């Protein structure tokens, strides 16, 4: 069974600016009224990096982390699941999923997982 992406963003009711994570006031117009929105559709890769010097407790050699923008404007950071030789470039379409990103104390920790679409 596929899990729903558990990210909640907030759209300002006054000016429409999307905030993720939550801010007490809109960064654009200072309003305090928001509506909750969920990311929708595929995601476009805005930027990414590979981290090779991981803290203690990570079993893998490196992590690839990316910032994506969903079709409805929500931006979020997630773990890109590709091997080290995979070609990544900004602007490419990523398939978002909610899945395990690491194990901690023998339990899976879930987060945003991204995979190249196609």
Image: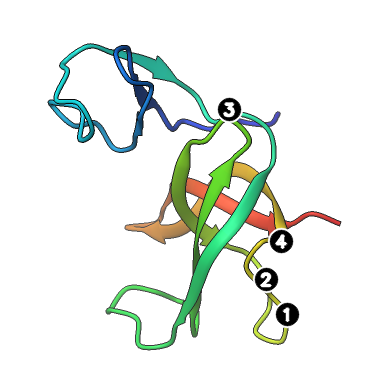
Horizontal side of residue 2 vs 12, given as left or right: right
- Say which residue label 4 marks: 92
Residue 3 or residue 51, whichever sits in front: 51
Is residue 110 visible to us here? no
Residue 15 horizontal/vertical position (percent): 33, 20
Task: Name above or below for residue 108 compared with residue 21.
Answer: below
Q: Are marks 2 and 1 in contact (CB under 8 Å)?
A: yes
Residue 58 horizontal/vertical position (percent): 39, 74
Numbered disc 3: secondary structure: loop
Query: Going from the N terminus, do you reach mark 1 or mark 4 first?
Result: 1
Cα–Cα span, label 2 and label 1: 6 Å
What crowding class fits label 1: few (fewer than 14 Cα within 10 Å), some (14-19), or many (20 or more)? few
Task: Name above or below for residue 74 compared with residue 96.
Answer: above
Query: Going from the N terminus, do you reach mark 3 or mark 4 first?
Result: 3
Query: Going from the N terminus, do you reach mark 3 or mark 2 first?
Result: 3
Numbered disc 2: secondary structure: loop
The residue under the point 68% across, 74% down is: 88
The residue under the point 61% across, 29% down is: 40
Of badges 2 and 4, the one in the foreground is 4
Numbered disc 4: secondary structure: loop
Cα–Cα span, label 3 and label 2: 21 Å
Q: Quadrant of the C terminus?
A: bottom right
Is residue 11 visible to us here? yes
Cα–Cα span, label 1 and label 3: 26 Å
Horizontal side of residue 38 vs 43, given as left or right: left
Give residue 82's mark: 2
- Say which residue label 1 marks: 86
């Amino acid at each position: 069974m596929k899990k729903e992406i558990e990210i909640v963003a907030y759209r300002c009711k006054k000016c429409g600016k999307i905030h993720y994570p939550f801010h007490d006031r809109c960064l654009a117009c200072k309003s305090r009224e928001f509506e909750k929105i969920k990311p929708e559709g595929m995601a476009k890769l805005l930027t990414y990096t590979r981290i090779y010097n991981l803290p203690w407790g990570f079993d893998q050699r490196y992590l690839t982390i990316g910032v994506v923008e969903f079709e409805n404007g929500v931006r979020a950071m997630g773990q890109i699941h590709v091997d080290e030789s995979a070609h990544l470039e900004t602007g490419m379409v990523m398939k978002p999923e909610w899945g395990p990103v690491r194990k901690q104390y023998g339990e899976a920790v879930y987060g945003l997982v991204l995979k190249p679409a196609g």
